[in-house]
Amino acid sequence: MVEYPRREKLAFLPTPIHKLEKLSKLLDGPEIYLKRDDITGSAVGGNKIRKLEYTVADAIDKGCDTLITCGGLQSNHCRATAFVATKLGLECHLVLNKTEEPKVEANLFLDKLAGAHIHYIPSEEYKKNLENLLKELQEKLNKQGKKAYVIPTGASFGIGNFGYIKAAEEVSKQCVEENVTFDYIVTAVGSGGTYTGLSMGQKLFLPKTKIVGINVSDDREYFVEKVKKISKESSAYMDKEIPIEEEVIHIIDGYVGLGYAKSRPEELKFIEDIARLEGVVFDPVYTGKAMFGLADQIKKGTFKKGEKILFIHTGGIFGIFPKAEMFELNQ
Ligand SMILES: *Cc1c(COP(=O)(O)O)cnc(C)c1O
């Protein structure tokens, strides 16, 4: 069906799927299932590992010995890259968006624990000049005799995208085994790679399923263009193009809230409610906002009783710790 590029086996796959019985009942709508990509293991879980499997294989095959990537101070992707690099004996450089005075905690602590080299960039400059900054660092390291490979934000690019094409194939096999068909797969959208991979995989493996994204940054228009761009990049590795037309891009805008990685009290309360209801931890930056959005859309009637939804738990648990004090726990 599809010729995958070579991958480094890093994630524990397949990740399990289980039903959120109580939440489904509480919302009185569709049956909600959860795919546990938060326990992909290896570099302590999350969706980025699937993309990094293909990305680092590409880096190694190109003779690179150093990885460079970028993200926010609490980036899950950077933390995953730091651990993957260590595991494979590569040097790791992280270019981080310094939006505030960095506190060495949660993901940032783990980056350092794994031995990554950290480069803090003032936010204004990061926003304006990221591509050049990455290129300059790459050139500098190469001059020192290294061979550095740049991974764009979230590993959301042509090669990393195969991680979620493969995940869609994995879901299709699980559907056969469990004799279930999902009407929708729902995921948070941050840099767009998870959504794009699932959308391409849907065309190959899940003809009856719609892929729905809930963006946690930027807006729908931005991601429509990004999805088209990433899918084009991936198609270059395949013998046929799998175009993702605008008609099949279902991105629900309206749940960014106060902005990327900023939380509203009702979002944190929702995370608390689900933790106590289902024993599952959603993160405040991605999955908490996306599930909050999904619950709201169920209330509004977008998703109905009798339908089945698979929500991808894309990980991010460490993102909850810097916000611990913002939770108003009842006890
Ligand atoms: C990066 C990330 C996402 C978003 O995935 P993209 O492929 O970047 O859109 C969702 N959840 C978590 C926990 C993440 O770290």
Image (spheres, rainbow, N blue to C red):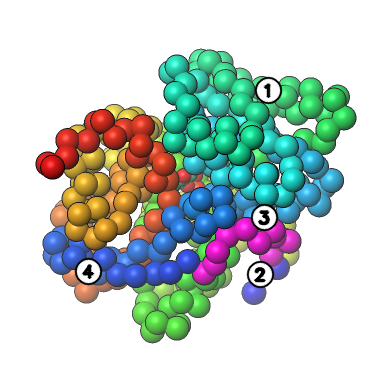
Q: First in sequence: mark 1 or mark 4?
A: 4
Q: For the residues marked 3 and 2, what is the alpha-carbon distance in whole angstroms? A: 14 Å
Q: Residues within 10 Å of mark 2 (few under 14, many from 20)?
A: few
Element under disc 1: helix
Mark 1: amino acid? Asn
Q: Which residue is mark 3?
A: 54
Q: Nearer the viewer, mark 3 or mark 2?
A: 3
Q: Residues within 10 Å of mark 3 (few under 14, many from 20)?
A: many
Q: Which residue is mark 1?
A: 132
Specify the segment rendered in magenta. Answer: 4-14
Q: First in sequence: mark 3 or mark 2?
A: 2
Q: Position of residue 9 (x, y in %)?
A: 66, 61
Q: Residue at x 52, y 57 (%)?
A: 41
Q: Which residue is mark 2?
A: 2
> 155 or 145: which is nearer to us?
145
Residue 185 visible to the viewer: no
